[in-house]
Image (cartoon, rainbow, N blue to C red):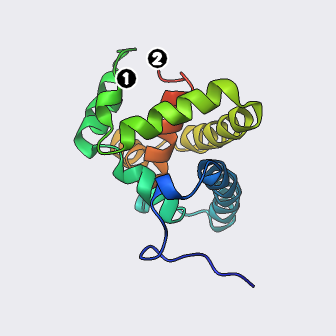
Amino acid sequence: MPTRPTRATAPPPAERGPGWLSDLLARASNEEAQEDAKEDAKKKARSQSPAKPLDPISLDVARMIDQEAAADAWQRYRRGDTQAFSPKIYVGRGQQTFEEVRRRYRSDPEFHNTVDRYVQEFEKILAQRDNQDENAQRDYLLSDTGKVYTMLAHAAGRLS
């Protein structure tokens, strides 16, 4: 049985090849569904801890987003600012990755569908958290999982 690479041995996103993000999204979708089922079964308050990192790839994506810029963008977006999200929230290779995701979203139907499924699942979980206070929702949006959602939803044009 093959093992997943650890954070220390995982190659950077640029070296993973063109399918690394598709693989991330497929795993994320499965893990989100499993997490949702576990939460329903346990009936725990979802606000106690943000989602755990999906895997080292999602950590890479999360590191590409400036925490403060993302918090500000979400606050402005919730107030109705449809221009709250811009490539300026991305740091390092984040802008390049964002552009790659946006390009692939527009040109690759399979990738498009994978992104849409991930975004829909995240939004479903977020909607279930609507009864929580605003701080809990903000924390979820700024978690590693939320940052992956932010990049994908932004690239798909859902945040404008």
Residue at figure coordinates x 63%, y 30% from the top left: 105
Indicate which disc residue 77 carries.
Answer: 1
Cα distance between the residues tagged 1 and 2: 9 Å
Left or right: 86, with 11 as reference point: left
Residue 37 vs 118, above or below: the answer is below
- Which residue is tagged 2? 160
Residue 11 in percent (x, y) is at 48, 66
Residue at figure coordinates x 35%, y 53% from the top left: 63
In what quadrant of the picture does the N terminus appear?
bottom right
Asked whether residue 66 appears in the rendered view, the answer is: yes
Residue 3 in percent (x, y) is at 64, 81
Residue at figure coordinates x 59%, y 43% from the top left: 122
Residue at figure coordinates x 54%, y 62% from the top left: 54
Residue 153 vs 18, above or below: the answer is above
Residue closer to the observer: 75 or 29? 29
Left or right: 9, with 76 as reference point: right
Residue 29 vs 2, above or below: the answer is above
Q: Amino acid at mark 1?
A: Tyr
Question: Which label's residue is closer to the chain start, 1 or 2?
Answer: 1
Residue closer to the observer: 85 or 61? 61
Label 1 vs label 2, nearer the camera: 2
Count up the numbered dots: 2
Check disc 2: other Cα within 10 Å, few if <14, some if 14-19, many if 20+. Answer: some
Q: Amino acid at mark 2?
A: Ser
Residue 49 in percent (x, y) is at 42, 62
Residue 6 in percent (x, y) is at 50, 77
Check disc 1: other Cα within 10 Å, few if <14, some if 14-19, many if 20+. Answer: some
